[in-house]
Amino acid sequence: MKLNVLKPNALSGRRAHIWQRISALYLLFFTPYLAWLTLKLPNFNNLYELTQYLIPPFYLLPILTAFCLVVIHSWIGLRDILIDYTPRTRTRFWLLSLQWLLALAVLNVIWLCLRLTDTL
């Protein structure tokens, strides 16, 4: 299976630019919402009470969307840096390494969400 993402000559700057701008706009509006949400939180005595409060979809979906967009935003930025500043012979290796690192981060967050919902 060949991935177009890993071919330096097939990388599209336009799609990456659009995704990075979409993620930046969402995060621009989400950050004040998250600050307001944090200030509005009551004092919790333990993690169980906090997760009980944040598990409803009204809170959880925007937070997970923001996390996914942060991963996309960072992938595009780091990918562009790797393409611009690494030697051509090592670019494919570093892009694959970055891809697996970000995939593991996403799987870790999914696992954490499942663990938190199981304990509730």
Image: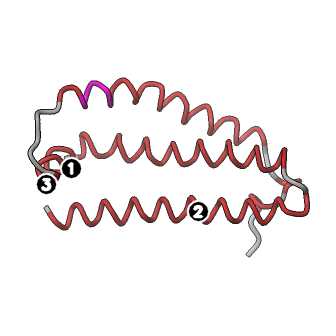
Alpha carbon distance from label 3 to label 1: 11 Å
For label 1, the SS is loop
Q: Split into 4 quadrants, where in the image is the C terminus?
A: bottom left
Pick whichever of labels 3 and 1 is earlier in the sequence.
Answer: 3
The answer to which quarter of the image holds residue 59 is top left
Q: How many marks?
A: 3
Q: Is 48 situated above or below 77?
A: below
Residue in the image at 70% along x and 42% along y: 16
In the image, residue 54 lies at what x, y percent? Answer: 21, 45
Q: Is 119 situated above or below 34?
A: below
Colour treatment of the image: secondary structure
What secondary structure is the magenta-colored segment mainly? Answer: helix
Magenta residue span: 34-38
- Residue contact between numbered discs 1 and 2, judged by CB atoms under 8 Å: no
The residue labelled by disc 2 is 101
Residue in the image at 43% along x and 41% along y: 66
Residue in the image at 54% along x and 36% along y: 23
Alpha carbon distance from label 2 to label 3: 29 Å
Pick whichever of labels 1 and 2 is earlier in the sequence.
Answer: 1
The residue labelled by disc 3 is 48
For label 2, the SS is helix
In the image, residue 73 lies at what x, y percent? Answer: 59, 42
